[in-house]
Amino acid sequence: MRATYWETIEQTIREKQYLWILTSLVKCARIYFSSAVRRQWCTPLIGTIIVTYRCNAGCSICELIGRAESSRELSTQEIIDFIDSLARLGVIGIVFSGGEPLLRSDILKLIRHAKKIGLRTHMPSNGYLIDDSCAKALVESELDSLTISIDGVTQGTFSRIRGNGHGLREALDGIERVIRAREKGIHKPRIRIATVITRQNLSELMEIVDIARQYRIDGIAFSRFEPIGLKGVRSKDLLLTSDDLPKAEMVIDELIRIKMREGLIDNSIGYLRLLKLALRNDRVPIRCLAGYSSLFLDCYGNVFPCLGHLALNKPIGKVGQTTLEDLWFSKRYGDLRAEMTGCRDCCFICHLEMNVALDPVKSLSVGLKYLL
C-alpha cells in the first residue's frame, strides 16, 4: 500500500480516532462492492478542488495550460460551499490543487475551513511562492501534507519540464522553508516530492532520490508522464521510447529496492511493478475505481469523475445547475462510472494507487509477480 495511506492510518491511531478508521474502512468496502455490482451504494473517498487554473510556471507536462480566467473563478464562499458539499457527501479528505494553489489569496482560509470540519487536507505546489511567511502560515493552517514538484537536478532539465522563468533552487528553497517552519511549529505536515518520469529526466531520477534524502523529505512519489489532453508536439519529447525501456525498468527496480530498504519511496511496490507494465504499454490488470472513489471540482463549478476527464475538459455536470449530491447519485453519473471501470487509458498515480488499495481481490488474482 502507498506510504501516504499507511501514514494516515498510523496518525489516526496515534490520535485515537478509531471511529474515523472504522468509517473509512466501511467506505472502502462500499466502494469495492458498489463497483463490483455496478450500483451507487457508495460516496467518494477523496475530493479534489482545482482552486485556480492560474499558474506561475509553464510546465510542458501540464494539460491545464490555457484554461485560466481569473474573472470566472468562484469566490471564497462558493469554494467553502464546495468543501461543505464534499463533506456532506462523505469524503474523508480534500486535495487543494491547481494551477498553483498559492496564487489564491484565500487558500489558507480554505485549508483551515476544511480542517475545522474534520477533513484531511493535502496540497501540491511548485514551491516558488513559499517564502518564510508563507511556510509558517502553511504549517499553522494545519495542512496535513504538502507535495513539491521536482523533475530534474540540472537547471536545463528542470526548465524544459517545469517551464522557464523559475528554477530548481526556488523549489528547493520552498521545501527548506517549510521544513524549518515545521520544526518550530506544533503541527507537523508531511512534506513530499513528486516526480513525473519522462524521457528528459530518466537519467536524473536517482539523483532526485538523493535530494529527498539530503533535504529529509518524508517521501518521494514517482508517476508516468500522461499525455492525455496534450497536443502531440508537446508530448513527443517527453514520452519514453522503446530504447528507453531497459533503463526505465532498471530505475524502477532500484526504486523498489530503496522502498524495501529505507522506505523513502512513497509509491507502493504494487504500483511500481504495474508502472513497468504501463511503460511497456501493456494493459494494467486492475479495474479503474476512480468513478467510485474520487470526485474533482474546478474553480468554475465544473464536476469531473476523474483526472483523465479533467485533462480532457469533459465535465459530467456543473454545481449550480444541480446539487453535488444529486449529481453524484444521478443515473447519468452512475452509467459513466460503471463504464469507467473498463478504462485503462491512464496511470495517474492518484487513481492507480487507490485502485490497487481498493481492489484486493483483483490485486491478489494477478499474482505476486506484480502486486506485492
Image: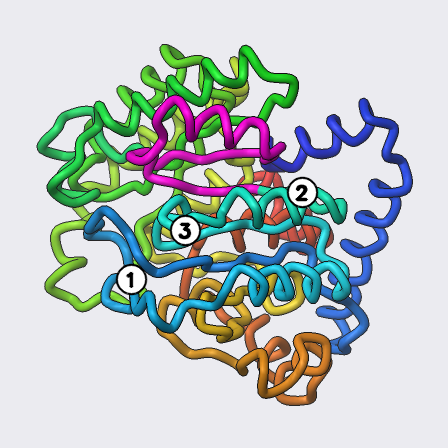
Residue 316 is situated, as x and y percent measured from the top left of the image, at 52, 81
Give neighbour class at mark 3: few <14, some 14-19, many 20+ (Cα, 10 Å). some
Q: Which residue is mark 2?
A: 120
- The nearer-to-camera label among 1 and 2 is 2
Marks 1 and 3 sit apart, C-alpha to C-alpha, by: 20 Å
Q: Which residue is mark 3?
A: 104
Residue 45 inside the magenta-drawn segment: no
Q: Which residue is mark 1?
A: 63
Q: Which residues are magenta?
A: 122-149
- Badge 1 or badge 3: first in the primary sequence: 1
Residue 257 is situated, as x and y percent measured from the top left of the image, at 46, 20
Give neighbour class at mark 2: few <14, some 14-19, many 20+ (Cα, 10 Å). many
Q: Is residue 79 left or right of residue 195?
A: right
Q: Secondary structure at mark 3?
A: loop
261 is higher (above) or lower (below) than 190: above
Q: Amino acid at mark 2?
A: Arg
